[in-house]
């Protein structure tokens, strides 16, 4: 029995049904987007009221300041970014709009000091400084009575340096955050070496060969690259050359000095 061919009318009905479904889908997406935008607008308004009510606490209490920043991030608001509601020379960050210039300037001044410290210590650490060490150095140069600086403040201040490109960024070596102030990406081998040096204080070619099962050439190359960048120091007095982490040595020196 022969089957009857599908006529043009059937194709027309199919196209019409597809168009109706597409139109309905667009309407739903538009409605959902409008509802979401309305909710975000309400959240931002409430956030602004909260900031104005607790402006003093946000300025003076670093923990409260960090919690407020996390609240902003939860709804997609970057307090340190330029406001999308204003443009041109008069644009300012949310901190400045809600709390006045003091908190806004606090972060940008902190960023300037961070750049100075990173530049001054680059010869010691090759442009890789721990966030905690950077914070401690920043605190030493602050006047008495100045707001306390936390690790979270340091990270947010460094985030304001993004317009400078890849020269300043936050990386993690193991479980420890570092500020990198040189435009160089660490490869996987270099990260593994730095992580081991962070834990043990130093590494050697044989340690990497045994623990990471690397070939001698691979271990030697990773160590020499990091040594050339100033991210490791070498002790040639040991039976086998030891490659030390500058950050580890500075931490030990600081602990010894505090204990003494």
Image (spheres, rainbow, N blue to C red):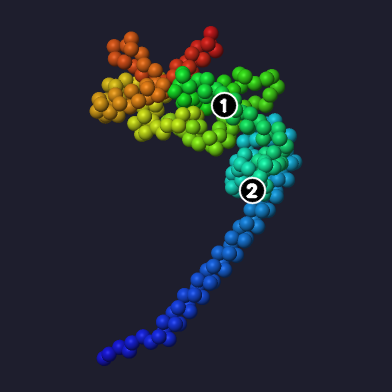
Observer-nearest of 107 and 89: 89
Residue 50's quadrant in the figure? top right
Spatial distance from mark 2 to mark 1, Cα to Cα? 27 Å
Helix, strand or loop at mark 2: loop
Q: Which residue lies furthest to the front in this view?
A: 89
Give the left or right position of residue 125, taking residue 37 as reference.
left
Say which label, 2 or 1, has the lower sequence index. 2
Helix, strand or loop at mark 1: helix
Instruction: Give the number of marks.
Output: 2
Tell me if mark 1 has few (under 14), some (14-19) or many (20+) residues whose alpha carbon lies within 10 angstroms of its own. many
Tell me if mark 2 has few (under 14), some (14-19) or many (20+) residues whose alpha carbon lies within 10 angstroms of its own. few
Give the left or right position of residue 62, taking residue 9 as reference.
right
Q: Which residue position is annotated with label 1?
A: 114
In percent of width and height, residue 115 lies at 55, 26
In percent of width and height, residue 73 lies at 59, 44
- Residue at 61% in and 57% down: 36
Give the left or right position of residue 206, taking residue 99 as reference.
left
- Residue at 61% in and 22% down: 139
Q: Which residue lies furthest to the top in this view?
A: 260
Is there a contact, CB below 8 Å, between mark 2 and mark 1? no
Give the left or right position of residue 216, taking residue 169 as reference.
left
Q: Which residue lies furthest to the bottom in this view?
A: 1
Q: Can residue 193 be seen in this view?
A: yes
The label on residue 191 is: none
In percent of width and height, residue 216 lies at 25, 25
Q: Is residue 175 visible?
A: no
Q: Tell me the quadrant of the picture where the N terminus can be found.
A: bottom left
- Residue at 71% in and 35% down: 101
In percent of width and height, residue 157 lies at 59, 32
Q: Which residue position is annotated with label 2?
A: 84
- Residue at 49% in and 25% down: 129
Residue 55's quadrant in the figure? top right
């Amino acid at each position: 029995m022969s089957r009857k061919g599908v006529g043009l009318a059937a194709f027309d009905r199919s196209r019409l049904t597809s168009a109706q479904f597409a139109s309905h889908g667009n309407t739903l997406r538009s409605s959902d987007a409008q509802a979401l935008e309305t909710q975000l607008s309400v959240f931002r308004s409430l956030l602004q009221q909260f900031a104005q009510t607790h402006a003093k606490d946000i300025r003076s209490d670093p923990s409260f300041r960090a919690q407020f920043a996390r609240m902003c991030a939860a709804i997609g608001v970057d307090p340190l970014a330029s406001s999308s509601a204003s443009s041109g020379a008069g644009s300012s960050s949310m901190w400045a709009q809600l709390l006045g210039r003091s908190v806004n300037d606090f972060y940008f001044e902190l960023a300037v000091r961070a750049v100075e410290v990173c530049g001054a210590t680059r010869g010691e650490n090759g442009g890789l400084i721990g966030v905690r060490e950077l914070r401690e150095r920043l605190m030493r140069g602050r006047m008495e009575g100045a707001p306390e600086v936390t690790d979270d403040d340091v990270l947010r201040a460094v985030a304001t340096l993004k317009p400078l490109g890849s020269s300043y960024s936050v990386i993690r070596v193991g479980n420890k955050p570092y500020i990198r102030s040189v435009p160089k990406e660490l490869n996987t081998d270099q990260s593994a070496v730095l992580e081991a040096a962070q834990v043990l204080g130093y590494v050697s070619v044989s340690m990497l060969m045994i623990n990471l099962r690397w070939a001698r050439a691979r271990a030697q190359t990773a160590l020499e690259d990091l040594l050339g960048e100033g991210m490791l120091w070498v002790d040639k007095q040991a039976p086998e050359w030891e490659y030390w982490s500058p950050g580890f040595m500075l931490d030990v020196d600081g602990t010894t000095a505090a204990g003494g």
